[in-house]
Image (spheres, grey):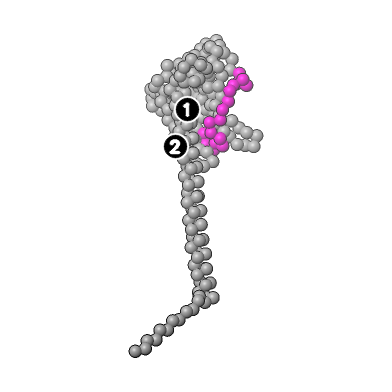
Amino acid sequence: MTGFKRSFERGFTLIELLIGLAVTAAVVGLMFAGFGVIGRTEERNQRLMDRAEHMLTVSQWLGRKFDTLRLLSRREGGGFVNFFSGNAAGAMWVAPLPERGHAGGLHVFRIGPWRHDDGRVDLSVEALPYDGSAMALDWSRALRETLLADVRTLQWHYQDGLTGNWTQQWDSTNKQYPARIRLELADARGDWPPLVFTLARAR
């Protein structure tokens, strides 16, 4: 019995080759698009983490400064007033620098907007070494640092511990210190959560 074996050999046609190349290009394109999305997501997450870390740093620094605030008075107009005052733009008070240890000693802090010639506004803190109740506040000699660049919203509020009312003006002639301070901030990327500080430990 004789068997017959037939084999058919053929290559890819031009159309099949073009289809294969098109499918491969589409897959590669999708892969690169996916990598791009992943890269943008990681970059966005990193920016969010950096912003949250900056918020925490500013909040903790202010918290330490308000927590160690000193109840001191200064001479003004023949009498004495509290070494604390504040308005909607910022505040001034006395606290140690650094917070712990003897190095640095007490300083007068003033925090508020710092305006650039191009119109940008930063949240800036200035510090002068505390030199007693009769010291002259020469802010041209102060150390200055930027807490937050490109501020879009800056509102300070002070709570009266007796009435519970909030105000944006706290004069140094007030016989008491505010019970709490609330700071509302926004930068170029949007609003910050309100920062609230309690002055219960002021001494």
The residue under the point 50% across, 61% down is 28
Instruction: Characterize the local packing of mark 1: few (<14), some (14-19) or many (20 or more) Cα atoms within 10 angstroms.
Output: few
Q: Nearer the viewer, residue 40 or 27?
A: 27
The residue under the point 48% across, 56% down is 34
Examine the image and state in which quarter residue 60 appears.
top left
Magenta range: 138-154
Residue 130, placed above or below residue 144: above
The image position of residue 57, as x and y in percent, is 47, 31
Q: Dot 1 lies on which element?
A: helix
Disc 1 versus disc 2: nearer the observer: 1
Residue identified by numbered label 1: 61
Residue 90, placed above or below residue 193: above
Amino acid on which the number 1 mark rests in the picture: Trp
Q: Nearer the viewer, residue 61 or 159?
A: 61
Q: Quadrant of the C terminus?
A: top left
Residue identified by numbered label 2: 193
For residue 165, say whether it is visible. Answer: yes
Distance of label 1 from label 2 (alpha carbons): 16 Å
The image position of residue 108, as x and y in percent, is 53, 19
For residue 159, say whether it is visible. Answer: no
